[in-house]
Amino acid sequence: MPVPPPRTLPALLALPVLLFALITWQVAADGPLIGADKRLSRALVHPDRLSELLADLGNVPVAVPVLALALAGAAWHGRAKGTDRWLLPPLAGALAMALVPALVAPLKAWTDRPGTPAVPPAVGYYPSGHTATAVVAYGAATLLLLPLLRSPAVRRGLVALCAVLVLGASYGLVRRGYHWPLDVVASWCLGAVLLAGVALVAGRTAPPVTRSARRSSSRTPSSSNGPG
């Protein structure tokens, strides 16, 4: 799995970090973006059964077992293949998931943001813990499983499934009124930063022979398909 060189990683992470800082500042200071956020929420909120089910994709009992299966699969495959430092990618995925509540809970307490009119009066809705859980659980599972897949079509399908699950959970949380749109966007940014670490570790420990082996085999004609 191609991973950006470490020296380019700060540049790639600049956008989500800056966007997260901007949104957090606006939430804390009740800035102009909050008014637009509330108007967008009013236009999108329509609680129904579908939005409830989609929002559940970000629940810990739903998302974390998916990641746990991917952690176990990546660990088993790495050990069976004798990959160097095979335990590092599963540990990176588990650490990213553990950091979600460790980061989200203090931010909720600090910003003290009230919920939408669709939920009972309360505070502590920023950022969205359910969105961050979905992003990191499904995203880390995808990053850990991608190096194990050989078919490009299957790899693309896995990435598409991850995107559908994350976007479905995000849409459900906003549509149901559980979160403001900015709560969700901020958690996308937070999740992107956490997943960058998982991608870096997974890329460095992936087997390095796959591409070269394919290139060498494609350049060496076999006796069955050589000139007659």
Image (cartoon, rainbow, N blue to C red):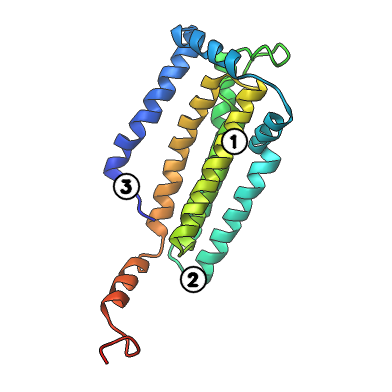
* Separation (CA) of disc 3 from disc 2: 25 Å
Front label number (3 vs 2) = 3
Structural crowding at the residue carrying mark 2, measured as other residues with C-alpha within 10 Å and reported as few (<14), some (14–19) or many (≥20):
few
C-beta proximity under 8 Å, tags 1 and 2: no
Residue for badge 1? 168
Instruction: Report helix, strand or loop for mark 2.
Output: helix
Q: Is residue 114 above or below residue 226?
A: above
Q: Is residue 97 visible?
A: no
Question: What residue is at 54 percent from the left and 26 percent from the top?
Answer: 184
Q: Is residue 176 above or below residue 143?
A: above
Q: Earlier in the sequence, mark 1 or mark 3?
A: 3
User: Which label sits on residue 81?
Assistant: 2
Q: Is residue 176 above or below residue 90?
A: above
Instruction: Report helix, strand or loop for mark 3.
Output: loop
Where residue 164 appears, x then y in whole percent?
A: 55, 41
Q: Is residue 151 visible?
A: yes
Query: Looking at the picture, which amino acid does disc 3 mark?
Result: Pro
Question: What residue is at 63 percent from the left and 24 percent from the top?
Answer: 175
Q: Quadrant of the N terminus?
A: bottom left
Where residue 140 appears, x then y in whole percent?
A: 52, 46
Query: Looking at the picture, which amino acid does disc 2 mark?
Result: Lys
C-beta proximity under 8 Å, tags 3 and 2: no
**Furthest residue in direction bottom, as rendered:** 228
Residue for badge 3? 4
Hey, which quadrant is residue 25 in on the image?
top left
* Separation (CA) of disc 1 from disc 2: 35 Å
